[in-house]
Amino acid sequence: MYDGIAMQFQRSVLFYRSPIDKLQQRVLDRAILGLENADDDTVYGPGPTMVVWVAALMSRLPWMNESQWRLVLDESQGHLQVVGEEIAQAVNGMFVKSEQPAGTIKNYQIAFVDGRYVTWDSLAMKGFIDMETGDRVEQLATPALESLSYNLTELARRELRRFLSIEQKESTDAGTDHAEQN
């Protein structure tokens, strides 16, 4: 059931049916989020939850390798934590306190450019990160041919909907082990 705090989940729930494997989960916990002793009962706040959701999104990108995945998360995790907190605050205001009218949540973006560069919407992020070298690049040498951007606000909305439906299914199936019934 919704407890009034958007984007706050136990680790066991957050990684439920996740495309992020156990080793990647450990890297996220320890190296990126600084959670040395995370276990299944550890509660992730909105910021770390947003980092995990972006990590899951990137783990599905067939052209992104492990080093690039780690680089992007290392470089963007501070921004993603702020984004998670801001989205959660807006969601809590809309659905719990009815303070914020629908459609007023800011859309946050992360963009991959020419299959080599990444950028996101933050005052601290000026330019791009080269995913081949790890260097910051203020301006591309030539105009970008392609860019693939992800709306992090919509990602959070979809993930929240998915997690809330998991919670509802789990609560209605409480005490039932479907594998034993078959």
Image (cartoon, helix red, strand yellow):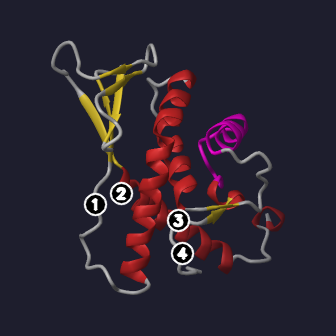
Q: Are marks 4 and 3 in contact (CB under 8 Å)?
A: yes
Q: Secondary structure at mark 4?
A: loop
The numbered disc on residue 106 is 1
Q: Are marks 3 and 1 in contact (CB under 8 Å)?
A: no
Question: Mark 3 vs mark 2: which is more N-terminal?
Answer: 3
Q: For the residues marked 3 and 1, what is the alpha-carbon distance in whole angstroms?
A: 16 Å
Q: Secondary structure at mark 3?
A: loop
Residue under the point 54% across and 34% down = 74
Q: Which residues are magenta?
A: 15-33
**x then y, percent, for residue 85:** 47, 62
Q: Are marks 1 and 4 in contact (CB under 8 Å)?
A: no
Question: Mark 1 vs mark 2: which is more N-terminal?
Answer: 1
- 22 part of magenta stretch: yes
Residue under the point 56% across and 48% down = 52
Q: Residues within 10 Å of mark 1 (few under 14, many from 20)?
A: few
Q: Residues within 10 Å of mark 2 (few under 14, many from 20)?
A: many
Quarter of the image for the C terminus: give it: bottom right
Q: Residues within 10 Å of mark 4 (few under 14, many from 20)?
A: some
Q: For the residues marked 1 and 4, what is the alpha-carbon distance in whole angstroms?
A: 19 Å
Residue located beneath label 4 in the image: 5
Farthest residue to the left: give it. 143
Residue under the point 71% across and 40% down = 30
Q: Are marks 4 and 2 in contact (CB under 8 Å)?
A: no
Q: For the residues marked 4 and 2, what is the alpha-carbon distance in whole angstroms?
A: 16 Å
Say above or below: 54 vs 169: above
Question: Which of the 4 quarters of the picture holds residue 14?
Answer: bottom right
Residue located beneath label 3 in the image: 7
- 109 part of magenta stretch: no
Tell us which disc is closer to us: 1 or 2: 1
Residue located beneath label 2 in the image: 153
Question: Mark 1 vs mark 4: which is more N-terminal?
Answer: 4
